[in-house]
Amino acid sequence: LKDTFKKRFLQGADELAMVRSGLDDTMRDALAVMRDLWHDNESVEDLRMAAYMIALQKVARSYESRAM
């Protein structure tokens, strides 16, 4: 193996790589939730509508938890 590969591999991930990895995980999870709603609910026409519905549900839960 090349020395540059060994050095990068043994050094580990830097902050930017960790942030990107976390963002990737978050986006994949969000897409899975939107996709499930889209396929399970016939009134949801597309992924955009599913995203809006999920966002509104989260806002409503937040208000309910604060008794507003």
Image: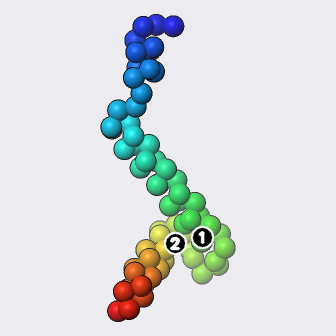
Left or right: where 64 falls relative to 30: left
Instruction: Tell me the residue that label 2 is attached to.
Output: 50
Q: Assign the C terminus to one quadrant of the image.
A: bottom left
Position of residue 7 measured from the top left corner of the image (x, y, whole percent): 40, 15
Q: Which residue type does callout 1 highlight?
A: Trp
Dot placed on the residue nearer the N-terminal end, 2 or 1:
1
Task: Kindly state the secondary structure of the residue where label 1 is placed.
Answer: helix
Q: Quadrant of residue 11?
A: top left
Residue that appears at 42% across and 27% down: 12
Contact between marks 2 and 1 (CB within 8 A): the answer is yes
Q: Which residue type does callout 2 highlight?
A: Ala
Q: Nearer the viewer, residue 40 or 65?
A: 65
As measured in the structure, the alpha-carbon distance from the residue carrying label 2 to the one carrying label 1 is 6 Å
Left or right: where 65 falls relative to 15: right
Position of residue 50 measured from the top left corner of the image (x, y, whole percent): 52, 72
Q: Is residue 10 above or below residue 67?
A: above
Q: Which mark is residue 38?
A: 1
